[in-house]
Amino acid sequence: MNIEVNGNYAEVRYRQKYSSTTVNESTTKKLFLRKENNRWKVYKELSGFE
């Protein structure tokens, strides 16, 4: 996991692994957060990139 904070904004990058009886996959995800009323909230999510 990689976290970059710039004031009231942050980016979080991580690799997600998921498996079930029918699916087995791994993907890179990126979350974009902003601080509102002293709480971090996700406002955008990307997946499937390197």
Image (cartoon, helix red, strand yellow):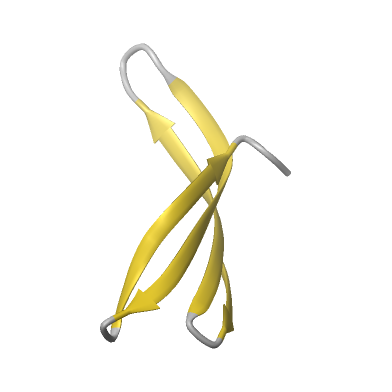
Which residue shows up at 32% across the image and 22% down it?
Answer: 20
Q: In the depicted view, which residue is nearer to us: 14 or 36? A: 36
Furthest-right residue in this view: 50
Query: Which quarter of the rendering shows the N terminus?
Result: bottom right
Quick check: can you spot residue 1? no
Q: Is residue 11 above or below residue 30?
A: below
Locate residue 45 relative to residue 6 in the image: left or right: left
Q: In the depicted view, which residue is nearer to us: 35 or 20? A: 35
Query: Which quarter of the rendering shows the C terminus?
Result: top right
Q: In the depicted view, which residue is nearer to us: 25 or 12? A: 12
Residue 33 screen position, x and y as percent: 45, 66
Which residue shows up at 54% across the image and 35% down it?
Answer: 26
Which residue shows up at 38% across the image and 28% down it?
Answer: 19
Residue 28 screen position, x and y as percent: 59, 44
> Total of numbered circles in the picture?
0
Q: Is residue 35 above or below residue 45?
A: below
Furthest-front residue in this view: 37
Furthest-top residue in this view: 22
Residue 34 screen position, x and y as percent: 43, 72
Q: In the depicted view, which residue is nearer to us: 25 or 46? A: 46
Which residue shows up at 56% across the image and 67% down it?
Answer: 11
Residue 23 screen position, x and y as percent: 41, 18
Quick check: can you spot residue 14? yes
Locate residue 21 relative to residue 28 in the image: left or right: left
